[in-house]
Image (tube, helix red, strand yellow):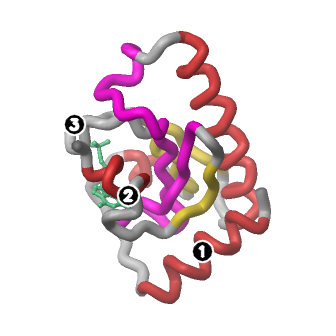
Amino acid sequence: MSIFTKIINGEIPAYKVAEDDNFLAFLDINPNAKGHTLCIPKREINKIFDMDEAAYLELMRFSRKVAKALERTVPCKRIGMAVVGLEVPHVHVHLIPLQDMEDMRFVRKTSLSETEFEALAKAIHQNM
Ligand code: 5GP
């Protein structure tokens, strides 16, 4: 079972941003930039291009909705999107508020307090 399935099952906590029957968005715990959000399918699958086409398109639709809310919440030049999956073998779309190219490199990290994470997740949710 992936760590993200444990989040879905409520076995480990996450700062949730949005949820529907099939998808969940929550803040990345080690963010590239403030607002870095992950969108995942609740059905655990390792690689994004192994998803069936309908589920893949639904994930994109869900991620777009979250990205729009993120852009309304966090000041940035634009929202970057990436799919990597080398660390967690459960499909996740990274949505990252960008100021510069460094924000897409997964090297420069930022840290937020618990209170900041909570406030941010709530603010993005309210902008959905
Ligand atoms: P990737 O698999 O795309 O290389 O990266 C996995 C991402 O998931 C990383 O950005 C990492 O910070 C994030 N991550 C790993 N474990 C957890 C967790 O338990 N909770 C949250 N919110 N994010 C996590």
Q: Is residue 91 above or below residue 74?
A: above
Res 82 seen here: yes
Q: Is residue 53 above or below residue 33?
A: above
Q: Residue at x 39, y 55 (%)?
A: 9
Residue that badge 3 annotates: 86
Residue 97 place in picture, x, y as percent: 57, 55
Residue that badge 1 annotates: 120
Quarter occupied by residue 128? bottom right
Q: Give whichever of discs 1 and 2 has the lower sequence position.
A: 2
Q: Residue at x 52, y 39 (%)?
A: 81
Q: Give whichever of discs 1 and 3 has the lower sequence position.
A: 3
What residue type is disc 1 on? Leu
Q: Is residue 113 above or below residue 29?
A: below
What residue type is disc 3 on? Leu
What residue type is disc 2 on? Ile
Ligand 1 closer than 8 Å to label 3 CB: yes
| Label 1 close to label 3 by CB (< 8 Å) | no
Q: Which residues are magenta?
A: 22-50
Ligand 1 closer than 8 Å to label 2 CB: yes
Q: Nearer the viewer, residue 20 or 60?
A: 20
Front disc: 1 or 2 = 2
Q: Is residue 62 left or right of residue 22?
A: right
Q: Is residue 102 left or right of residue 54?
A: left
Residue 67 place in picture, x, y as percent: 66, 47
Residue that badge 2 annotates: 7
